[in-house]
Image (tube, coloured by chain):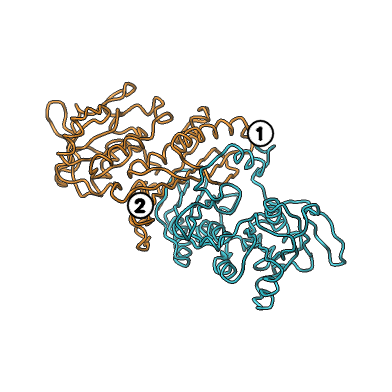
Chain colours: A orange, B cyan
């Protein structure tokens, strides 16, 4: 049997099933970050992401944007847990004939974003590889009270996204803003019940929340905010790499957020009983069960 | 200009020169681990290492040993700073046609070693890649008093290695014991002035200590403990991946360690003035300046 037959998520489940951790691990595999004991008031957040030439960016892409993206995807994971970034390591693989100019642009993209988010680049690793591959591992911190996981969505919660969806293929995946500021605003003002960043498409990432929270959802097609670059609703539902926040709030908090007229946050649906699974309701009020599609490595 | 013209260490220097960090970073790029503020008594250690098919292991190698090595190289970095490992993330890239059996063996190698060192595997990342590539990022802790860097070797220090050298090509690079226990013994009993793990060959790794400590060294060829598998002295001096500890102790501590008859620790030379650079003294007492060779990615 080949790993493709397990599929990406089957593969992760297989790994998860073999692992057992000690009590200092508040949350291991299965969320945007690992959550680790730190001190009386805070947890450490620990996450890593790999971006790969030919899969996550094209060879001809501006290396500045590639470097920027390598850092941004992990910042987005820290945001999804409600935290602030602190330190990162960068593992950089590249072919021997890579130009120093390419390297410098790549670094500039990383450093500019790191500076913007008060993130320290504290070390790493360089290796010779057949293609450019960048793995960033990042440490963040979050106040215990402000930690948000995927697993606490409650019946009746309103589902929100932090901005428009479906623009990734036209370049947003290289230029997106990691939603640290927005997540901090939310966790300061509200009890955010669940949150994830949309890296694999709205449908797939919402299904992660539903699975971890043992819940179902109705999503209203007419409410999904489409990016100007999106070609259709499918782009918003299934295209990965929007890197917007997807989160749920109890009804009372949802009303309060909407009344604040922070227009970036759009309500798109609600959490319902698990038996309904994930349903999309079209503009005429007709629900259909959504078949999950989205980018998968395997 | 190409990155090969900078060379691996030139490349790292170029990256280092562009980076500035805040005061919570006790030590950034340029040691075995990054050293980060943690609490009153301890530092966090943060390190990552990539191993790559065709460079760090052969395609036909037992995947159990490959998984084991992926974890062991970072454990060795934690040991070199005097710390204990706590948590790690694993980024795993592999071709689509990788067999589930291969994956399971790889995981078994990781998990067995993790268990042995009370290390939690708390998350990671899977991606499709052209060859097997594993990046492990690891967090450890060290008591402030027991932290050892590369930069504090002192004139007159005795240089030690933790065991025999030169056996890596015959398989030791896949089966080595990360010297956590030995490093903890040393930092408990002595003031270890400087330490590094030998990943790039004795000559190259000693030159890192000399550079960071602004010092020179005499190494006595007759004292270097050769592995049974080593073909000659060159294997011990220049072959990477012994993963033994290389450390220096003040003369008084060195005498005490030798008198304890912990036979694994072998004195091989002494720290001298910087002007002498790195010299090897042959069995007839003739010194020669050592030209550094060792594995380099670029």
> In terms of depth relative to the viewer, which is nearer, A154 or A119?
A119
- How many numbered marks have been drawn onto this rendered protein structure? 2
Q: Position of residue A96 (x, y in %)?
A: 63, 38
Q: Could you give the CA–CA distance between mark 1 and mark 2, rounded to whole angstroms?
A: 44 Å
Query: For the point 61% across and 48% down, which residue is it?
Result: B30
Q: Is residue A22 above or below residue A240?
A: below
Disc 2, SS? strand
Near mark 1 (Cα within 10 A), the count class, few <14, some 14-19 or many ≥20, is some
Q: Is residue B37 left or right of residue A201?
A: right
Q: Position of residue B175 (x, y in %)?
A: 57, 64
Q: Is residue A82 above or below residue B64?
A: above
Q: From this viewpoint, which residue is outermost toward the front?
A: B40
Q: Is residue A130 above or below residue A228?
A: below
> In terms of depth relative to the viewer, which is nearer, A274 or A157?
A157
Q: Position of residue A297 (x, y in %)?
A: 40, 42
Image quarter of residue B230? bottom right
Residue that mark 2 sits on: A42
Label at residue B2: 1
> In terms of depth relative to the viewer, which is nearer, A265 or B50?
A265
Q: Are marks 1 and 2 in contact (CB under 8 Å)?
A: no
Q: Position of residue B258 (x, y in %)?
A: 69, 75
């Amino acid at each position: 049997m080949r790993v493709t037959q397990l599929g990406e998520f089957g593969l992760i489940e297989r790994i998860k099933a073999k692992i057992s951790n000690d009590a200092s691990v508040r949350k291991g595999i299965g969320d945007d970050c690992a959550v680790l004991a730190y001190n009386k008031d805070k947890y450490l957040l620990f996450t890593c992401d790999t971006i790969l030439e030919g899969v996550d960016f094209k060879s001809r892409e501006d290396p500045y944007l590639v470097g920027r993206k390598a850092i941004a995807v992990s910042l987005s994971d820290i945001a999804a847990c409600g935290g602030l970034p602190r330190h990162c390591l960068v593992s950089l693989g590249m072919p021997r004939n890579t130009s120093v100019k390419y390297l410098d642009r790549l670094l500039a993209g990383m450093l500019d974003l790191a500076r913007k988010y008060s993130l320290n680049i504290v070390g790493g690793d360089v290796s010779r590889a057949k293609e450019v591959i960048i793995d960033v591992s990042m440490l963040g911190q979050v106040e215990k009270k402000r930690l948000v996981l995927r697993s606490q969505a409650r019946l009746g919660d309103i589902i929100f996204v932090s901005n428009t969806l479906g623009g990734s293929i036209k370049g947003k995946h290289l230029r997106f803003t990691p939603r640290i500021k927005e997540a901090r605003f939310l966790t300061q003002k509200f009890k955010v019940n669940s949150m994830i960043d949309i890296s694999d498409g709205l449908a797939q990432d919402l299904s992660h929340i539903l699975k971890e929270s043992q819940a179902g959802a109705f999503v209203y097609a007419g409410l999904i905010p489409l990016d100007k670059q999106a070609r259709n609703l499918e782009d918003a539902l299934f295209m990965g790499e929007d890197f917007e926040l997807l989160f749920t709030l109890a009804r009372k908090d949802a009303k309060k957020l909407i009344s604040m007229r922070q227009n970036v946050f759009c309500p798109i649906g609600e959490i319902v009983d698990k038996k309904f699974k994930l349903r999309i309701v079209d503009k005429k009020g007709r629900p259909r069960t959504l078949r999950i599609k989205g980018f998968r490595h395997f």
